[in-house]
Amino acid sequence: MTACAIETTSAGADDGDPENPGSRGTRPAVPGTPGVPVPPYAITADGAYAARLALDGESWFPERWTLDGPEPYAVPLPGNQPEEPGTQVQPMGDGRVLIHRLVERHHAFSLLYPTGPGTGELALGAIECPEPETRLTLLPPAPCGTRAYALAVGARSTAVWRVAGGPAGPERLAELPGRCSGGVWLDTAGRMLAVDRELGGRTKTVVVDLGAGGAVTPLLQIAPDSDDRLLLADPDSGLLVIASDAPSPGQERLGWGVLGSTLPVRFPASLRLPDCAVTPFAIQPGQVLMPESCAVALRVDGPLGTWVGTWRPAERRVRHLPAPEGWLAGAGLWTPEGVLRLPYATAETPCGVAELTVKGPVPTAEGADGTPEGAGGTPEGAAEETEAARPVPLQKAPLASSSVANS
């Protein structure tokens, strides 16, 4: 069991105004400085806000980016003392920034907001994890923008916590046997959470229904002896991007499937780039029931550096694009119109967003039976707005059918 206890903290008297940058200036925080790690950059599901730890000299401080205006701008949110490099920050839908600080074995959570020249802070409470091997990390921003969640991974089990947006402080919502990692939202309500669970020597993706008391159902079960992980999901189209060693035991490959579909998982040869590490980081939204047309953004790390790749299931090839200078590598999002927005920071432009448009025809890829790939992949419950899509365990066609497995 993952042993973590709650420490409640009385809330502040004023939530503050999250949309009041005032005269606060941005300070240069250039990624890629030798010897300095680049902290994660988190973006809200609607793309309106982002947050990261920025560096001023040798001091780390939270920084919020506003992305939905005519021009992006950053608002520094420094506290009374510099933050530790491992501090986590996450933007909320109202513009406030959730901060997760570790003090010994206490995980403290607060909401930060600008107050003219200063920073306001609303304490939410803390979680104590007395077991030294327990690791607590924030999950990706919830689609609703009003709540935030975390995983507490212990030696033999994992707990899912709601750390912001609840009625009173952090609350444990579910406990799963095994050690979990990752975290992908499968619906727009922030109810169905997919995590990669290591249990019995194998890793499989399961779904935790946060609206049904933490009920757990399987999602990825490609082969009995394979390690299967979910990397990305798009609720609109149902497109899933996965990593598995099922087609090549001992060697992880990228593949794709459709939530709720009976079609097999595909492992395109085009996603195997020699001497390169390929990491998917964003799926184009808004392509309802058209998973094969969704663009997927890739971070590619190779001998010549780091650049951007884009791929669609229907195209069967990767397009390679140069990354903007100062790109916060691995961060970005698609617009429904197919524009890839990549945040970057340089000494000259401490808060910038580069926009890349990938043009060209999108052919329809055919499956082994001559039908378009992804056809019939409608998630169950899609017609009922109040019901979350119920995931169906995905199975891969026999490996002997190479035209299907590797298309």
Image (cartoon, helix red, strand yellow):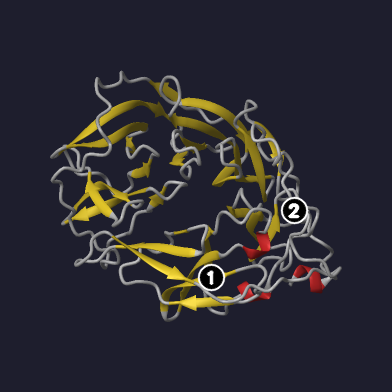
Q: Earlier in the sequence, mark 1 or mark 2?
A: 1
Look at the image and tell me in which quarter the N terminus lies: top right
Q: Residue at x 30, y 50 (%)?
A: 65
* Residue 187: numbered disc: none
Cα distance between the residues tagged 1 and 2: 22 Å
Residue type at numbered disc 2: Gly
* Residue 331 position within the rendered picture, expressed as x and y whole percent measured from the top left: 42, 59
Q: Three-letter amino acid code at disc 1?
A: Thr
The percent coordinates of residue 205 (x first, y second) are 66, 47
Question: Which of 278/296 is in front?
Answer: 296
* 149, above or below 229, in the image: above
Label 1–label 2 contact, CB within 8 A: no
Closer to the camera, 8 or 310? 310
* Residue that appears at 30% across and 27% down: 123
The mark tally for this picture is: 2
Q: Is residue 30 left or right of residue 341?
A: left
Say whether residue 98 is left or right of residue 14: right
Q: Is residue 244 visible?
A: no
Q: Residue at x 23, y 59 (%)?
A: 29
Q: Which residue is mark 1?
A: 310
Q: Secondary structure at mark 2?
A: loop
Q: Residues within 10 Å of mark 1 (few under 14, many from 20)?
A: many
Q: Position of residue 245 (x, y in %)?
A: 68, 63
Give the residue number, with chain letter if any, for mark 2.
377
Q: Secondary structure at mark 1?
A: strand
